[in-house]
Amino acid sequence: MGVKEIFETMDYGPAPESAAEALAWLVDQGDRFGHFIEGAWTDVGETFESRNPATGEVLAHVTQGTQADVDAAVAAARKAQPKWAKLGGPGRARVLYALARLVQKHSRLLAVLETMDNGKPIRESRDIDIPLVARHFYYHAGLAQLMESEAPGMEPLGVCGQVIPWNFPLLMLAWKVAPAIAAGNCVVLKPAEYTSLTALCFADICRQAGVPKGVVNIVTGDGRTGEMIVTHDGVDKVAFTGSTEVGRRIREATAGQGKSLTLELGGKGPYIVFDDADLDSAIEGLVDAIWFNQGQVCCAGSRLLVQESVAGRFHDKLKARMDKLRVGDPLDKCVDVGAVVDPVQLGTIRDMVEGSDGEVYRADCDVPEGCFYPPTLITGLAPSDRLMQEEIFGPVLVSTTFRTPDEAVALANNTRYGLAASVWTENLNLALGMAPKLAAGVVWINGTNMFDAAAGFGGVRESGFGREGGWEGLSAYLKPAVKAKALKTTEARTGTPDETGEALDRTAKMYVGGKQARPDGGYSRAIYGASGKLIGHVGIGNRKDLRNAVEAAQGAKGWSRTTGHLRAQILYYIAENLEARSGEFAARIDALTGGRNGRTEVAATVSRLFSYGAWADKYAGDLRSVPIRGMALAVREPVGVIGALCPDEAPLLGFVSVMAPAIAMGNRVVLVPSEAYPLAATDFYQVLETSDVPGGVVNIVTGRHADLAEPLASHLDVDAAWSFSSSALSQAIEAKSAGNLKRTWVNNGIARDWMGTEGEGRAFLDQATEVKTVWVPYGE
Ligand code: NAI
């Protein structure tokens, strides 16, 4: 074709990137890979093939990890960890910096290898994936450097088991490995079985960067190997990215093992276009939202919600744009949409589209034979249709319309997921008004699919919990540096029944929706003092009482919209009212526990309330410096409804230490007071009643922790479950939380010093909030 014809047709010529270097690297490695354990390659074991999905060609043979391999990798990580931690933040920073530099140096090799292994267009791996990998190591080199001054009193968790998916193979590795090793942990990472090659190339880079042996271990294999890693006894923290289904299985499998867990799972991101949006920009954004990486993106804008008045025009523009997308050889620099990762995934996409009764528009563009799927738009679906609800994880967009902003919010939130959302409008008030209403961990305003190491990424609801990126991402790899003491079970005191029946008049009620409530079951339990004397009765709460309390808490949503200033005043007021009755509360605590610390405990409780009054308007989040036009606001939002089993060690202080941070941050709570000493908490609702706390914000259900733990953890309208109980209930709570994948915070049988700094502060505020990252255009 001559220059004249090219100008006339404006067709693209082929612009292939050479595969030679990447193929040579594979040949150098012998095409057969063992694992990377303790700084060396293991012998090749039983292998599986890693194929190029665009051509079907076998690229390499990769070893299926066995239990012995996982044991060896965990042992290597364990052995290396103390020395790596002792190297200190600045020492580790140098190693991370070397990794960043080497990723940049080998960026073309990594980009080509990634494209060959995964099928994504080279334009993306070259311009997005690999630069973000380098950025991640640079940023975390910085966090390591500053960690000791900025996160004092914290230490690494130990050995991290990390399992990642195939959609961003090296980027997900960087998201996992960089914070873990920056914090002083060692890792055992398993790449996805479709895409192991860049992880293995990264192992090679670790050697060049001088990463000490055993700090980074890469074990390849399928889900069976993944399961061995996440359930391994020697693993202290599990970080997983992948499907919600596997995430749920991991939550159940690791329940009660005392492991930290972060899950980054699926999504069905709404892409909301208002009639005043710059429609052409919104179309270009949509191309990035759903056709980036063939739509195999957990935060893809896969659900278009377009305002009815412009829907026809928008769909016409969209179809015209879809027809111009170039689908084909991922190594061609002019290609927009590459190959789907594997024929299995292609089959899933096909089946989902074919099973839909919506109106299907397939882009009128050439689609090569093989593992390719045309850009597709489906309209005419009801909000409850499967394709509107489930991840397709392919280049398929579903679309519906809305009339008002409220309707847009309702449709956007009508999903079990909550990962990311985009809002397109030229009206700043509207955009920023929408952001807090969307159930999502990330909101992009007039943008989409923007990522950076400084900005937290992660979801709410069934999209998982935990953040990657920013200080909040690093904190998921740290714990307070305190010597753990085992928690002793506190038994309720026994005594002599009161034969006069006088105590019947002193049955403390529960507190639900701002009102005193009798237990549904009609049973109560005698509470004896230290002297064995009967001092009262408390109701034995059951599942129904909990349900009522959760309903009341859900009904008090307005509390989450109040200002920090208002919540601060209410917390100060509670403190003041408690102080006025301190003598009475101190006597009660002494009578219950048989100690003489009542006064000290009440004084500490008053002080704690003042602390959280202070925090209420000072923990709103911050601003992140991102290297993209705009800024990222890290907004700390309340989690929602928090259910908690309160500690036995400090009947009043423990109860308030759980309640106060939660309500200070705008949550509503369902609290189960100390089982042994519940009366300190039931007296406390009188203080709440006189302190302007709106009904439903604090609900108190007394009863047996062992009976209430499961219903609390499995309730679908509870957003987080905490347990500080001295009964061993961590396993039950973590296992039952898997239903709606609520966040959990359990003590794993470790005692906490409620009087000291362990009983208060940022750890509580972090657990009481979710970081929502809002990307806002800013500057030129
Ligand atoms: P997956 O969730 O099964 O795989 C992700 C990773 O988990 C892989 O490394 C896999 O080997 C590992 N794994 C599988 N079972 C495991 C277990 N029981 N314990 C520990 N690790 C385990 O995802 P898959 O099967 O590759 O894709 C299926 C669907 O999942 C996709 O169609 C898509 O809808 C969704 N998906 C979502 C991702 C996201 O980032 N949200 C990423 C990948 C897939």
Image: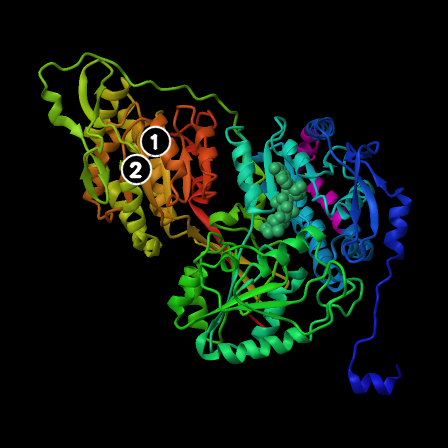
Q: Mark 2 points at which residue?
A: 546
Q: Are marks 1 and 2 in contact (CB under 8 Å)?
A: yes
Q: Mark 1 points at which residue?
A: 708
On the image, the x and y values in percent for residue 573 come to 24, 45
Quarter of the image where one finds residue 712? top left
Residue depicted at x 21% and y 39%:
687
On the image, the x and y values in percent for residue 660 come to 34, 41
Q: Depth check: give the residue in front, 229 or 675.
A: 229
**Vertical order, 503 against 130 (above or below):** above
Classified by dominant secondary structure, the portion drawn in magenta counts as helix
In the picture, measured across the screen, residue 636 lies left or right of residue 712, that is: right
Is residue 144 visible in the rendered image? The answer is no
Q: Is mark 1 within 8 Å of ligand 1?
A: no
Q: What stretch is highlighted in magenta?
A: 81-100
Quadrant holding the N terminus: bottom right
Amino acid type of the residue that numbered disc 2 sits on in the rendered structure: Leu
